[in-house]
Structures are given as C-alpha cells and as structure tokens.
Image: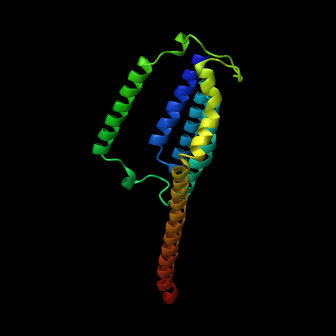
Amino acid sequence: MIQALFIALSGFGLLMALGTVFARNLVHAGLYLVAFFFVVACQFVLLEAEFMAAIQVLIYIGAVAVLLMFGIMLTRNIQGDDTTIVTKQWRLLGLGAFGSVLVVLILGINSHEPWTQLAVRPEFPVDATTKTERGRAILSMTPTVGREMMTRYVVPFELAGLLLTAALVGAVVLAQYDNADEAEALAESAKPSATQS
C-alpha cells in the first residue's frame, strides 16, 4: 500500500515538475511549483520525517513560493514571448544536467540499503526509552535543528531573509518605474490628439 502511494505521489510530482518547466504562463508555473513542494512534503511524511514535512510546508510553500508569486505578479511579462524562448545550446546544456542528475540518483538509490532489509525499525511514536540508533536520531532531530538554526546558522539564515526582502523591494521599485514610464508615454500620446480637437 505504501509503495503504491509512493509511486502515485512520485508520478504526480513528476507531472507538476514538468508543468513548472514547460508552462508558458508564469503564474501557472508558480502554481505547479507549489503543488510540487506539497508532493515533496507528502514524501517526507511517507519517510516518517514529519518535522521535515512541516518545514517543507512552512518554508517552501509558505515563504519561498509566496515570494515567487509576488515577483511574478510584479513582472510585466506574465505570458512568455520570443524573448523568453530558450536557445538550442541552453536546451542541450539542460539535458546534460538532467542526465547527470538522473545517473547520480539511480546509482545512489541502487547502492542504498532498502527499507525492507533493515534489521531494526522502531515502532512509533518513539519514546525516551528507545535504544535503537534510528530512534535516538528521531528524538534528537528537532532539538538539533533548532540549536543549529539559532547558533551556527543564524547569520546565514538572517542574510538569506534579508536578500529575499531586498529582492522583493527591488521588484516593487522597478514595477513603479515601469508604471510611471507607461503613464508618461500615455500622456504624451494623448497631447497631440487634444491639440487637434
């Protein structure tokens, strides 16, 4: 049952990823990306990594995807045109990168010990008396991530948030300049018609 659910979710995730890449409308591409992020969160739940699933939803869907949608809404070229068509060289480079990642994934998955061959798999919920290495790792996951985020990685984390905020402010400023230029052009085009009448 779990394997069938995994295969169904994986197929749906691949469809959403392809929709993100091939959608001509940027808003549709952003929505496909949100659906893909949700599929990744579902895969984390299947892997019994509920904390990672929650982080996936909160950070990627709740923050990164929303920021992307803001950027898309502030751009003028929502529908792709000739300036956004990828050249043949870039397509070949993309296919090469895709093939390299696919080979690495296949080799990594085939060399990994499958779940079905694990000798010990603790029952859930894991309590404080668990003796297995995996159970101790699950218990220490949330405190470890919290300590690392608030001590070792606090400066990079805050810098990333600052850069994302600066990008959003820059997009708003550029959109305002474009709107001002467009209004000025409309005003200039309306002047001759007013003098002729």
The image shows residue 45 at horizontal and vertical percentages of 63, 28
Identified at 57% across, 22% down, the residue is 6
Residue at the spot x=35%, y=47% of the render?
86
Q: Quarter-wise, where is residue 118 in the image?
A: top right
The location of residue 91, given as percent across then percent down, is: 32, 41
Colouring convention used in this rendered image of the protein: rainbow
Q: Is residue 75 above or below residue 181?
A: above
- Quadrant of residue 70 in the image? bottom right
From the viewer's side, name the closer residue of 82 and 110: 110
Given residues 53 and 113, the one toward you in this image is 113
Image coordinates of residue 13 in percent, x first then y, are: 53, 31
Does 163 appear above or below 63? Answer: below
Which residue occupies 54% across, 58% down? 162
Which is nearer the eye, 74 or 152? Answer: 152
Total number of numbered labels?
0
As drawn, the residue found furthest toward the left would be 89
State whether residue 48 appears in this view: no
The image position of residue 152, as x and y in percent, is 53, 45
Q: Where the N terminus falls, by quadrant?
A: top right
**Residue 38, visible in the rendered structure:** yes
The front one of 72 and 114 is 114
